[in-house]
Amino acid sequence: MSTKTDKIDRLAELTAQTETSTGHSLAYEAFRRLRASKMAVIGACIIAVFVVLAVLGPWIAPYSPTAQAWRGEVLPAQSVFVGPRGENWLGLDHLGRDEFSRMLVGARQTLLVGVVSTLLGFTVGCLIGVGAGAAATLGGRLGRRIDTVVMRFIDMLLALPSLLLAVSVAAVLGQSLTTVMIAVGVVQIPIFARLLRGAMLAQGGSDYVLASQALGVRKRRIVLGHIVPNSLSPVIVQATLSLATAIIEAAALSYLGLGNPDAAVPEWGVMLAQAQRFFDAAPMLAVYPSVGIIITALGFTLLGEAMREALDPKLRS
Amino acid sequence: MPLLSVDELTVTFTARGRRDVRAVSGVSFSVDQGEVVGLVGESGCGKSVTSLALMGLLPKRGVTVGGRAEFDGTDLFGLGDAKLREMRGSQLAMIFQDPLSSLNPVVPIGVQVTEILSRHRGLKGEAARKEAAHLLDRVGIPDPRRRLKEYPHQLSGGMRQRALIAMAVACAPRLLIADEPTTALDVTIQAQILELLKELVDEEGTALLMITHDLGVVAGLCDQVNVLYAGKTVESAGRRELFASPTHPYANGLLGSIPRLDAPRGEPLRPVRGSINDQIAWADGCAFAPRCDHYTLECLQGTPELTEPRTPGHQVRCVNPVLSPVGAGDVAVIEAPHIVTGLETGLETGPETGPEAGPGTEQPAPGAVTAVAAAAPATGEPSGEAGTVPTVEPAGKPAPGADVTTAGGAAPRTVTQARDGEEPGGEPAAPSAAGEEPTEAGS
């Protein structure tokens, strides 16, 4: 008797559980898979720490990043440097500034360049992608022509080496943080445009698009309400991965001296470039910004890869 | 004047560097208010292309549509894109084969239903949601308010198809085209969906164009049946007439290929030999000739015309129609018995003349059995409709698959009944299959 009631209870519990586990969107299901992935959790933690530091950096930094408070203790010409010590956790740079404070404050620049440039590439790329994709799928003969012209132009952009394009943009616009953002962002436009257009083309031939057409749904509604939501997941994954590349490329451009000319604003790429001159005497000064760049990029890459897996339609149950 | 009349519809696909393919070549039929017309045929005979052409959903590039299609006096092919879009969903609607892929996976059901309502009936917000819930309720989805918020993957197959039907009938269209609406569903659900469609036709007076390869569906639902072969109508008749006396060798063979529950054990299945070949044009003669048992040299002298060799209104495109199969005197149209219980429909069996049947029943190679056995299961008549199924016995030739389906979801049970002292030859077996492409394997 009791075992039987137990069984019934357990069955009821099970049903109750399945009841609660249904009723969620695919996005929620993807989020659940994401949470179960170690890679995603590690990546998200790294990103969270990085974002907190970037936002709060100037307030939690123990010293001003520009104050040359210990100028006399550092003699770059004689290869005299101060390593990590109680009051300066990461030591001093070649001008006697606190390296730890500079790292903290520099994080904000890195985040800013990464996010803004990726946003730029994402927005412009997606607009072009939606336009070309919509024209190609539902625009008829004229639409296909427009799509062909736009995509050939995008192909040309894609053929340019990204760094070269960035240097050219920097050459035209002059040396500034905005230049770096635009340069890095422009490089990403063709990637997003092609990705979204391709996904839209794939969705455009699907049954539900035909079914909506058979029920007289307007083209605009089919594109924005049906095709685009189904095409977004690879683009979102790409955006996360792009943040990593953007951070590395921004650092590379700053390293090459195309970044912010204002020495008062510390930036990891610039710090790396300056530390290079004293690599023999104080190699750690180059290591700190490098490690910062690598770990941040790693965080975004881990999250992006995990998202790619979580959003993979083949894994949808 | 019929609601939809299709006259000499032709659809030709052209591709650079390839021969033109004429998928539909001169199909004519008409559908009246409250009437169910079936287009039957094996894969590749042009039934889906016909439906897409009527809806104007074929791609513009590389496709030529000819002929006329008049819907309530308007020429469907002469309408502009915008006009046609206006009509789709409100006047004409279509249900597709695969309910899962026909619903957008990332949009809740409710949004997909209300979008049709706002498009054609201008309903917004709460009014649209209320109407959507009413629609889901109408097609038999329980707890519609909750279902509106759910996504297609959370619904069962039958419920998805119901949701699609709800979307299709949202604006009370006058013509509903159903393109194999039950193919992706299992047998019990098939019966429920067919019953729902029948209900809609009876209550709303909607005209239904039913596209199927399933003769069981035809037997249960259609008033008028058009059998297509290689893009042409080969036989067109009322349902009862067609099942009682299939006159074109192809239709005859199709009906003969249905496995029977009451066949003697070990009797081989009788497929239609060969497979459809779209390279054979009708212009060189009858496209069915290479597979036909009644084939003579006359068959290759130009396209056979539609004639009425048997009864008026029963059109057949054949120069050697199957007019008098052996023992034609035995032909009997038998009304199916009334339902035995609430769950079952009866399977009527007629006089068994054994495997020695009429012409066109040559013994196939043993390999043919698998080809037919793999075909889709037929859908029987849902409960309550049994009285309308004619089960026929053209001289001992197998009857259409009036098989048994339980509406309640239990395993199908066979009820064999004898009438007027006829011998019940029934033998409970697998549900009968109305075969798509009953072909001889290895040909």
Image: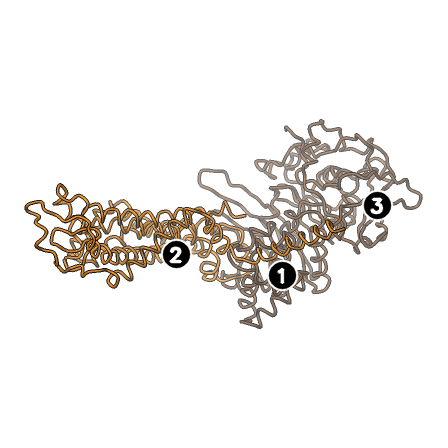
State the residue lying farthest toward the left.
A77
* Residue B128, position as x, y percentages in the image: 57, 70
The location of residue A126, given as percent across then percent down, is 36, 56
Image x and y of residue B23, in percent: 57, 44
Dot 2 lies on which element?
Answer: helix
Q: Residue furthest front?
A: A86
- The residue wearing badge 3 is B415
- The dot on residue B166 is 1
Letter of the brown chain:
B
Q: Residue at x 34, y 51 (%)?
A: A46
Chain holding disc 2: A
| Residue type marked 3 | Val
Using a 10 Å C-alpha cutoff, classify the residue at mark 1 as few (fewer than 14 neighbours), some (14 to 19) or many (20 or more): many
Q: CA distance from mark 2 to mark 1?
A: 30 Å
Q: Residue A153's spot in the image, x, y percent?
A: 29, 50
Please state, as top left, top right, bottom left or bottom right, where the N terminus of chain B lies in the image: bottom right
Question: Does residue A54 show up?
Answer: yes
In this rendering, is residue A46 above or below B422?
Answer: below
Residue closest to the eye, B214 or A29: A29
- SS class of the residue under badge 1? helix
Q: Left or right: where does residue A39 sit relative to residue B246?
A: left
Chain coloured orange in the rendered structure: A
Q: Nearer the viewer, residue A28 or A272?
A: A272
Q: Label 1 lies in what chain?
A: B
Residue where numbered disc 2 is placed:
A130
